[in-house]
Amino acid sequence: MKKRTLIQLALTFLFFSLPFFFFRVVPNFLPLKIPMDVDKIRTGPHAGKYLVTDVSGKIVIMNFTTSEVVWETDEPHFFVHEAAMMPDGNSIIVADTEANRVFVMNISNKVILWEWYAKNNTHYTYMDYMNWTEFGLTHGWNEEALAIVQDFNPPRDLGSLVVHYTHLNKVQFINGSDFNRTYDTILISVRNFDIIIEVNYTAQEGEAAYMNITWHYGMPGDHATLNHQHMPTRWNQTGHVGHTTICDSDNNRIIEIDANNTVVWEYTGNKLRWPRDCDLLPNGNYLITDSGNNRIIEVNRTTNSIVRTFTDPWFFIPYEADYIEEDNQIVVGVNQIIMIFDYETGKVVKTIGFAYMVAPFLIIIGIAIIYVSIDSILQFRKMQEKSVITRLKSYEMYSKFILIGILVMIMYFLNYIANFFGYYMLR
């Protein structure tokens, strides 16, 4: 068998084996597989460390200085969207997307302290239930809205890898004392129902869950109000007290509503594409994660102009970015990698994780480029009897040049290609 044929067979084997190795073997040796939500812990025994939500169904606390995992739980189901530290610093609240529930867990003993289920659980007798039909009838929902909440097997979106009944994607604990209330609440984004709800956290257990909803915004199917939203956040800062910012993702806009559900600010400029996070910065600007455009932008709330842009060639549909004021840094989960940007320079100062989903294809393309380049040199040397110009103009040579050019372009644009497909598959 010719040496060239052996090389081709080896490359073929590599082509099929590398993805398996990176997708099935490598992740088992990584502390994180798909980090999505990354929050710095402010209080409690783990203050200064980071709470990281891994979509694969794991929540960890990490020391970013050493990249060491100091605590973890695999209580959530696959596809957990967010976890946040509670005010006591020793418990976390989790948006367990796959299980259609929100729960609070004690970090010390991993005991679940509180649960709220978003699925119509009228057929269950062992837990408080959520009756969306009853809630909808109470609030005058139309037939389309009622049909959506009664469909336990919703159709899969075009290209989507996942299909959920509610797709809970955000939770926020709201301290009642901040708003002169005698009770605490949980703000929950129910993406597939195009609605945000506020649930009484301190209500007595045993009552139907829908009766504990104290506030809501949106209605299933009312896409003029909300369309598959992300990251609603209630603010208590001067000038924004009681206001809620919402990433109206599929409408490609950010809105801010007041306590009366009136839109007081809207941002649709600069061609937003599936924005999924919006944070109020200390300077009054907004930090927006523009997922579909692979960028994070700082927007002046008054002029709606972009002040700063953070991006990187390794960005792959970033989900949530946080400004860490004491470090003057931006921390963002980029699916497989956690990136830390210097706020002033916009440069990446640290990465944690490994892009194992893209790496095998980069390696394969790189090897293919080397192989074709060497083969071109050998082919060029075989035609020594011809002039250099004639050899370069021959079909054998220029076809290889074209192939190398195509491979280089694929390598350069691979992340953009992956982003294009990922954008539709993850929605």
Image (tube, rainbow, N blue to C red):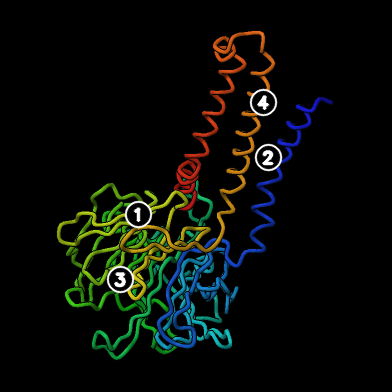
Q: Nearer the viewer, mark 2 or mark 1?
A: 2
Residue labelled with disc 1: 290
Q: Earlier in the sequence, mark 2 or mark 1?
A: 2
Task: Name the residue at 52% across, 82% down.
Answer: 105
Which quadrant is the N terminus positioned in?
top right
* Residue 306 can be seen, yes or no: yes
Specify the farthest residue to the right: 1
Q: Provide the secondary structure element on which disc 4 rests.
A: helix
Q: Earlier in the sequence, mark 1 or mark 4?
A: 1
Q: Are marks 1 and 4 in contact (CB under 8 Å)?
A: no
Residue labelled with disc 3: 216
Whole-angstrom CA distance, mark 2 to mark 4, is 18 Å
Circle on res. 15: 2
Circle on res. 375: 4
The amino acid type of the residue labelled 2 equals Phe
Task: Name the residue at 67% across, 18% down.
Answer: 381
Whole-angstrom CA distance, mark 3 to mark 1, is 25 Å
Task: Name the residue at 54% across, 61% down.
Answer: 34
Q: Earlier in the sequence, mark 4 or mark 3?
A: 3
Q: Residue 382: x, y in percent? A: 69, 16
Q: Nearer the viewer, mark 1 or mark 4?
A: 4
Q: Provide the secondary structure element on which disc 3 rests.
A: strand
Tell whether 323 sits left or right of 336.
left
Q: Residue 139: x, y in percent? A: 29, 69
Whole-angstrom CA distance, mark 2 to mark 1, is 33 Å
Q: Nearer the viewer, mark 3 or mark 2?
A: 2
Q: Are marks 2 and 1 in contact (CB under 8 Å)?
A: no
